[in-house]
């Protein structure tokens, strides 16, 4: 059960990457996690970590940009609705202005 327990603990530690307060903290947590996976020598974990490594930039960016999948899906659906309503627009510039108006973002 040692291997299973190691995999469970490393899985829980990996989840913490999405809740870090800063990019630096997230990056250092990744490096610690990566080293622990290498030390575990568990082939499934090593394969998973190797496949995850190309996406680390996006994972670490989640510390700065707090978007989750339900927010993104809602935005995509709203853009699709604007696209359906935009049938007949003659230029794409107006279409993108409508999208920008639908998502004003945070006031700076």
Image: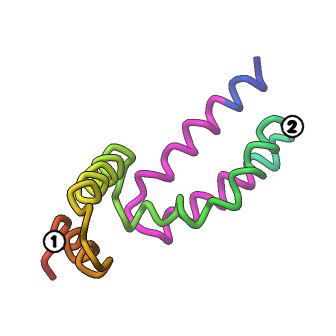
- Magenta-drawn stretch, dominant element (helix, strand or loop): helix
Q: Nearer the viewer, mark 1 or mark 2?
A: 1
Crowd around label 1: few <14 · some 14–19 · many ≥20 (10 Å)? few
Quadrant hosting residue 83? bottom left
Q: Is residue 105 visible?
A: no
Residue 19 on the magenta span: yes
* 5 on left or right of 90: right
Quadrant hosting residue 90? bottom left
In this rendered view, identify the residue nearer to me: 1 or 52: 52
Q: Is residue 76 above or below residue 101?
A: above
Q: Over which residues does the magenta segment extend?
A: 8-36
Q: Which residue is mark 2?
A: 43
Residue 58, percent from left and from top: 54, 63
Q: Is residue 91 above or below residue 69?
A: below
Residue 39, percent from left and from top: 82, 47
In this rendered view, identify the residue nearer to me: 14 or 65: 65
Q: How many marks?
A: 2
Q: Which residue is mark 1?
A: 101
The residue drawn where x is 29% and y is 54% is 75
């Amino acid at each position: 059960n040692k291997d299973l327990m190691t995999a469970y603990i490393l899985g829980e530690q990996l989840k913490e990457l999405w809740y870090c307060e800063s990019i630096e903290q997230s990056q250092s947590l990744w490096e610690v996690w990566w080293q622990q996976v290498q030390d575990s020598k568990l082939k499934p974990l090593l394969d998973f970590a190797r496949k995850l490594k190309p996406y680390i930039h996006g994972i670490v960016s989640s510390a700065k940009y707090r978007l989750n999948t339900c927010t993104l899906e809602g935005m995509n659906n709203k853009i699709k609705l604007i696209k359906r309503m935009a049938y007949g627009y003659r230029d794409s510039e107006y279409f993108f202005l409508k999208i920008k108006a639908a998502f004003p973002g945070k006031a700076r």
